[in-house]
Amino acid sequence: MEILAFGVQADERPLIEEAFAGRHEVRCLDVFLTEDTAPIAAGYEVVSSSVNADLGGRVLRALAAGGTRMIAQRSTGFNNIDLDAARELGLTVSRVSYYSPYSVAEFAWTLAMAVNRRIVRASNRTRDFDFRLDGLMGRDLRGRTAGVVGTGKIGEAFTRIAAGFGMNLLGWDVVENPACVDLGMKYVDKEDLFARSDLISLHVPLLAATHHLVDARALRTMKDDAILVNSSRGGLVDTEALVAELRAGRFAGVGLDVYEAEAGLFFLDRSLEAVEDDTLARLVTFPNVVVTSHQAYYTHEAVGQIVAATLHNVQSYVAGRTTENTLTAPTAP
C-alpha cells in the first residue's frame, strides 16, 4: 500500500521512510493538508497528517470522495479534526496517544529560562559586540512557586524539573497525580494557582472547556512579575488579552511555543511576506516575550516514537484492528 504523508519536515522524512521501508511505500510532501491540497490525496487509501492539518468537515469529505479511508495523524492533540464528520463518512482516524513527555517538558523549561535570564536579548546584543548587562537581570527560581496547569505525563515531567530547582509546587487538574503529590505538589483551584505562582506552565489539551483557560480575568489575577509558558496548544491563551497586559508592562516573561492562529504560519517560511496577523506581529515585539514555532515535541526521540506509533496505527488498520490510538472507525456490520 502507498501512503501519502502531508506536512513532513525535512528532519522527519528519513525517519518516516526508514520506519515504513519494506512494509509500505510512503510519498512525503512538505505541504500541509488543507482544503486546497486535499485533492492531491485522490487515490490514496491512507493519508497521514501533521499537527496543524485542517481536518474539518469539508476536507474530510474531499478526502473521502477521493478514496481515502484512513487518516493517521502524527500528533497527540486532535482538536483540528471533525470527528463527527469522520464517523458519518466511515473514516478511520488515529492519533499518537503517547511520545516522550520529556521533549515538551524540557522545552517548556528552556522557554522559562530563556525569558527569565533574557537569553535572546543577550545573544542579539553580543552578535553586535554589545556586552552591557543593562536590562538582563533575571531571578533565582529556587524558593519561588511553580504552578503546573495539567499534571499528566508532560506536567509530571515539568514538575520533576521544578522540584530539582527547589521550587514550591502548585498544581491544577481534574485528577491529582500521585507522583506529583510525592514531589511535594499541593493541588489548588486554578484561580489560586494563577494568583500565587511565580512561574506558570500550561500542559492541558485544548478542549471546549479549556479554550482561553488563560483569559483576561486569569491574566489580571497573575502577579505582575510572573512568567507564563505555553507549550501545549495556542488556544489555551487569549492572545489579545495577553497583548493588552504586556502593553501595560506586566509579566517578567512570556514563552510561547504555540499560538492560537498558528495554522498557515507555523512550520512555513513567511519571512519575505507582509505580516497580516496584527496580534502576532505585536506579540513578537515585546522584549520579554519569546515565541517559537511549535517545536517543543521536536526531538529525535519523540519524533521517532511518533513515527513508530503512526506505523503501528497503519498496520492495525490494514489488519482490521482498532487500538488505543483509534479515534474513529467504521462500525462493524
Image (cartoon, grey):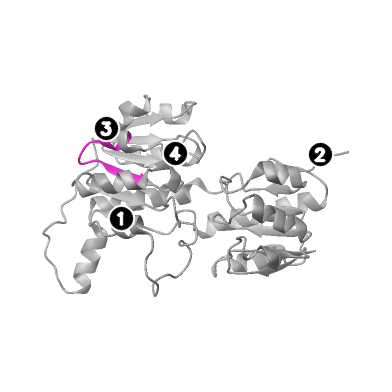
Q: Which residue is mark 3?
A: 221
Residue positioned 31% across, 43% down in the render? 241
Magenta residue span? 218-229
For marks 3 and 2 on the same chain, the one whose residue lies earlier in the sequence: 3
Categorize mark 3 by other alpha carbons within 10 Å: few (<14), some (14-19), many (20+): some
Residue positioned 12% across, 60% down in the render? 133
Where is residue 43 shown, x and y percent of the image?
78, 65
Q: Which residue is mark 1?
A: 283
Q: Is residue 203 above or below residue 180?
A: below
For marks 3 and 4 on the same chain, the one whose residue lies earlier in the sequence: 4
Q: Nearer the viewer, mark 1 or mark 4?
A: 1
Can you say which quadrant of the picture contains the C terminus?
top right
Does the magenta segment cover residue 23?
no
Q: Which residue is mark 4?
A: 155
Where is residue 127 shown, x and y percent of the image?
22, 73
Q: Amino acid at mark 4?
A: Gly
